[in-house]
Image: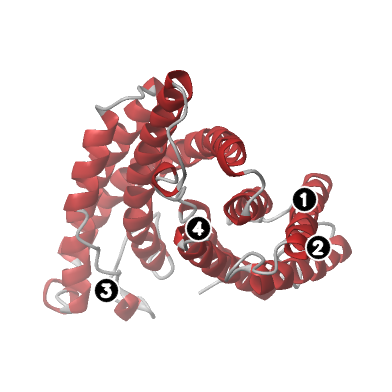
Amino acid sequence: MTFPTILRHALCAATILVAIPGSVAAQTAPAAPAIAAADEADLQAAIAKSNAYTALMNRTLRAIQSWDRYASWVDMAKGPTGKERYITYGLYSLYDVAGEIRKAEDAAASAPALPGIDDTIRRYIKAYQDLAPLITRAERYYERKDYRDDNAAEGRTLHAAMVPAARTFLAERATLDAQMRVYKKSLDTRELASVERREGRSARWQIRNIMINARAVMDLMPSNEKPIVDLKAFDGAVADYAAAVREMDRFKESDAKGVPMIESQASSWLGKIRDFRDKLARSKGDVRKGAASDANWLVSSYNTMVTLSESAARMPR
């Protein structure tokens, strides 16, 4: 598999794995005044909606991976002939997403209303439901090597149906991805302020601050469509992340417990990000010229940080 495909798989996962942790209100002290309580309730509803959409996006990422697998061996313009060198690659089987779809549909009908994103998620679900059965049929067809019996006739029929369905699905995915990034940034700001208002710059605040700034770096990482990094913007995001790490260090000086679970990972990631940036500088931002493996490592390590941060945020202090 070529570099761009590998990186896009990892980046999608990383970008979409940044679900905002669940209710932090339940972990805090006494009830605030009525207005603050209402604001907190609205924030938690917004986070719940974000989490439902994120869960669906994470689970349906498998369809993108399966489609890329197919595109890696078939001539997309002509369709399959049954004689392709790597036809045995076939496609990946899809996951059961019925539960995630149901929760996302419920979220779309729930407050807070987000007309743009809610409409997109409905279109995204429809596009997935149009494409998924075709991928499943094709996956079984190539797994069973049925193309040997019909000279790839059904493969060509499936290809003709899959191509437009995949285009629609990928277009809706790109739209949803962009909308969710903006939405999550606004939620990040609100949640960080909420934690600080209730707890000060506590360990939980430090965790969220680290992960918000780490995601800002991830948002500027290269992708299949954009392999050349905007170095100026990247430098700014790295500088902000470094400031968050320093803030975490200062917190540890005043609290011996520090920030559990992610301290070492967060610091190590900063060092690797800086090494990666140096490689990008030598190639004028083009990740294809020697930094692809570093990019994939950073994405994988970031996903680990996401998991650790969610566990750390739930730990009692």
Residue 170 lies, in percent from the top left, at 40, 45
Circles 1 and 3: CB distance less than 8 Å?
no
Which is nearer the eye, 30 or 248? 30
Q: Position of residue 77 (x, y in %)?
A: 40, 54
Residue drawn at x 72%, y 73% is 268
For the residues bearing labels 4 and 2, Cβ distance under 8 angstroms:
no
Disc 2 vs disc 1: Cβ atoms closer than 8 Å?
yes
Q: Which residue is the site of mark 1? A: 234
Name the N-terminal-most of marks 1 and 3. Answer: 3
Q: Residues within 10 Å of mark 2 (few under 14, many from 20)?
A: many
Viewer-nearest of labels 4 and 2?
4
Tell me the crowding category of disc 3: few under 14, some 14 to 19, or many 20 or more residues within 10 angstroms, Cα based.
many
Give the CA distance from mark 4 to mark 3.
Answer: 52 Å
Position of 150 with respect to 101 (left or right) is: left
Q: Is residue 43 visible?
A: yes
> For the residue marked with disc 4, what is the amino acid?
Ala
Q: Give the Cα separation between the discs numbered 2 and 1.
A: 8 Å
What residue does disc 3 label?
Answer: 82
Percent of width and height locating residue 169? 34, 43
Q: Classify 40 as above or below 52.
A: above
Task: Name the residue beneath numbered marker 2.
Answer: 277
